[in-house]
Image (tube, rainbow, N blue to C red):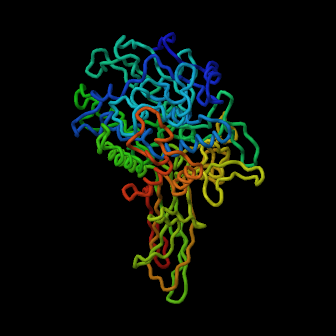
Amino acid sequence: MRPDASRLRIVAFGLAASFAATAAFALDYTPHGTQPGLDVTLGAVSVCIDCHRSLDPANAGFMPHSTWGGSMMANAMRDPLFWAALDVANHDAASEGHAGVGDYCLRCHTPRGWLGGRVVKNGSGGTTGTGGESGCKLLGNYASKDRDNSDYSGVDCHYCHRLMQGGPQGEAFIAGNANAWVDDALTCESTPGFFGPCRRGPYQYAAGSMLEAPHGWAYSSHHTGSAICATCHDVTTPDTDQGPLKTLVRADGTDSGRPFPIERTSTEWSRSLFADAILRDGFGDAPSGTPAVATVQPCQACHMRTSQDPLAKACEANPAGSRTGNLPVHEFAGANAWVPGIIKAEYGGNLLQQPEDYDRTIASARDMLASSATVSTTITAYTPATPTTAGSISIEVEVTNLSGHKLPTGYPEGRRMWLNLQVRSAANALVAESGAYDDATATLTEDVQARVYESLQGIWDAQSHACVVESAGAKQFHFVLNNCIAKDNRIPPIGFRVTAPDDPEGLEAGPVAANYAETSPGSGVLVNTDRVAYTFSVPAGTTGPLSAKATLYHQVASSDYIAFLRDQSIDNAFAAENDLCAGGPGRPFTVGPQALSRGEYMYELWTSPLHGKSPPEPVATGVAVAKTGSRRR
């Protein structure tokens, strides 16, 4: 189906410059894809709730709104970490003479507000004026119910289900930075004139069947594959109307000319075996040893798991069980088990979502983490201590990435995984430790043997000829100013190919300051495991047998990152949110930061005993026991 192009207000590559010509800001940060000013505004989530949310608790685990409601997709605009980072991005870009970069950030987080012309672009070729880049023109607030047609309902139903593979004039799909094409036709062929535009999805219904939607619908192969996820899950420096804001500087100091790659989750997947075939040995339900099947495993296979519930249905009007084994659950499971709890506690009492929605999101994140990796621990050498002499123990820990992308992936700032290795005596006394973490201070001890998996991005300094990620001993996180990668030792997915035809140097997603062996010499395919060797002294008098326990942890936000956001807001005198947005719709807010800057509010939440300091989530554990003269796995 091709929407009526004459009815669309969509700006393609060559036409987008009209915004820059009339804009109050020097750069157009979002020149590609569908632009603000739709003929048919995005329908409120309330349009979908009556049919796609169930009041019956027995159905809550599979109904679309019930499972989406607690997700980070639904809460992308309630996330206090995002808002604190947005203020830093706006300040950083403005410091270089490029105001308004928040337009680029908010496009992904509030497609409703952005396409509605309430961010920077007003939908008529002009701008909303100062404040839009900070979210001050948006309708609603953090605690607005989805029924209120709020811009704070995140990445919602009508947006995702109006996405198209290409533009109305045959324009190509554009991955990343929310460069999306949105169906804006007034009618839909399946039910002309009724609830148009089409709701697009992965199903083809028989006319008049019990499963046919009562609104305009269209089958969309785009919704069955990973390209739709790449819309927002590859993030690149703003590709402005005047070229990329930042280009990637190589490790040798030369400028690659490539737009700086900030997040590459989709690219990581596309270079893995998951994009080629389902690996049955060790994955899925097939018996061990079953050969690989030549079928792509898209993002949805893991992040929108199919419900096997015997009552599964997509709509309240559908028969119970009509979608059992054939209903992608809209939980959008990820690795964030911390922020949903904050949103539940801070705003959940006012939202349509029930507390159980957030509880399901947290549980699904923990399930996702538990399925993402395995850890094995092996004692490779052991000299027992005597009452008068010290001994020693050597250990190898192997971490295997089972996910379809790097481990960890996504937003790089403050996100990390690490190995904690503890050696204990027969009396359970701690003998040695690497990667120790203090819950009270949220401090990770990065000893010389510690393995921390992360991507550290920075700003190239020509004088020191280095990618700088610290200032005065404190880590820096300047998202929109970064132009180099100092470290990326995150574990590749299985079958990961470093290079691609459009990236012969492997600059987009290859390891940096880390070495992963090829699966076979010259293959260009990296192993999906990391092996870490440790050696510890065993104090005299330690009694065995000794046990070695390695635990892989995941953390959403490091203490360094939270402190950075707070310090930036203080050092740069960021305004309290109600002052920043004075005169905006619904201001002053009575929820959220209010009399605090967003960075200070985030720090206040982080220090609250109610929320904890982004507590590390255990992912996988491996244990080994050392006895005199033996080696055990």
The residue at the far right in this view is 463
- Residue at 27% in and 38% down: 60
- Left or right: residue 263 versus residue 328 is right
In the rendered image, residue 48, in percent from the top left (x then y), is placed at 32, 27
Residue 293 lies, with reference to residue 414, above or below; the image says above
Residue 488 lies, with reference to residue 257, above or below; the image says below
Identify which residue, 623 or 252, lies in the foreground.
252
| Quadrant of image for the N terminus | top left
- Left or right: residue 455 versus residue 372 is right
In the rendered image, residue 415, in percent from the top left (x then y), is placed at 52, 51
In the rendered image, residue 219, in percent from the top left (x then y), is placed at 41, 21
- Residue at 51% in and 12% down: 5
**Which of the 4 quarters of the picture holds residue 268?**
top right
Identify which residue, 109 or 171, lies in the foreground.
109
In the rendered image, residue 295, in percent from the top left (x then y), is placed at 47, 34
- Residue at 46% in and 76% down: 627
Residue 15 lies, with reference to residue 421, above or below; the image says above
